[in-house]
Image (cartoon, helix red, strand yellow):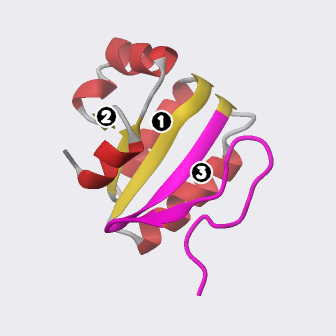
Amino acid sequence: MTGAGDTHHEGVVGDGYPAGAGWVVVAHGELDQDTLAPLEQDLAAAADRHRVVVLDAGSVTFGDSSFLNLLLRVHHLTALRIAAPGEQLRRLFALTGADTVLSLYPSVEDAVGGS
């Protein structure tokens, strides 16, 4: 049996894996309207199959408004947890107020544990 997001998309999405009661989707690089499709597919598939989805954002170097919009949409589908966002993403979330809506965690382990 295969899990959600276990196919590798070159560019912005790494291999996903099960963790605790949910699924971890690993993203990296620059996420904007031109690169977002593979991540959107993996997050949607994970949200369809798991009640908790963790986005490992530790290697994301840039995210724009289309990336933020995707996160907010997925947040409404499942318990989305954002793990290890870098400075640029934390700034984006703070400036837009998304940090009051999205669940942000310092690490994947914290996000999986929900602490």
Q: Nearer the viewer, mark 2 or mark 1?
A: 2
Residue at 55%, 70% in the rendered image: 4
Residue placed most toward the observer, 15 or 62: 15
Residue 64 located left or right of residue 21: right
Residue occupying image coordinates x 47% and y 46%: 55
**Amino acid marked by disc 1:** Asn
In this view, which residue lies farthest toward the bottom?
1
List the residue tagged with mark 1.
69
Residue 51: image location, x then y, percent: 32, 67
| Number of residues whose C-alpha sits closer than 10 Å to that of mark 2, classed few (under 14), some (14–19) or many (20 or more) | many
Mark 2 and mark 3: span between their CA atoms? 19 Å
> How far from the left and from the top, in percent, is residue 85?
44, 28
Identify the mark nearer the N-term, 2 or 3: 3
Measured as percent of width and height from the top left, residue 81 is found at: 34, 46
Q: Residues within 10 Å of mark 1 (few under 14, many from 20)?
A: few
Distance CA(mark 2)–CA(mark 1): 16 Å
Q: Of the numbered discs in the image, which one, if any, rests on residue 79? A: none
- What amino acid type is highlighted by mark number 3? Glu
Three-letter residue code for mark 2 = Leu
Q: Nearer the viewer, mark 2 or mark 3?
A: 2
* Vertical position of residue 114 compared to residue 30: above or below: below
Magenta segment: 1-28
Residue drawn at the location 46% of the way across and 15% of the way down:
87
Q: CA distance from mark 1 to mark 3?
A: 11 Å
Q: Secondary structure at mark 1?
A: helix
Dominant SS in magenta: loop
Q: Considering only order in the chain, which callout, 3 or 1, is on the residue closer to the N terminus?
A: 3
Residue that carries the numbered disc 2 in the rendered image: 104
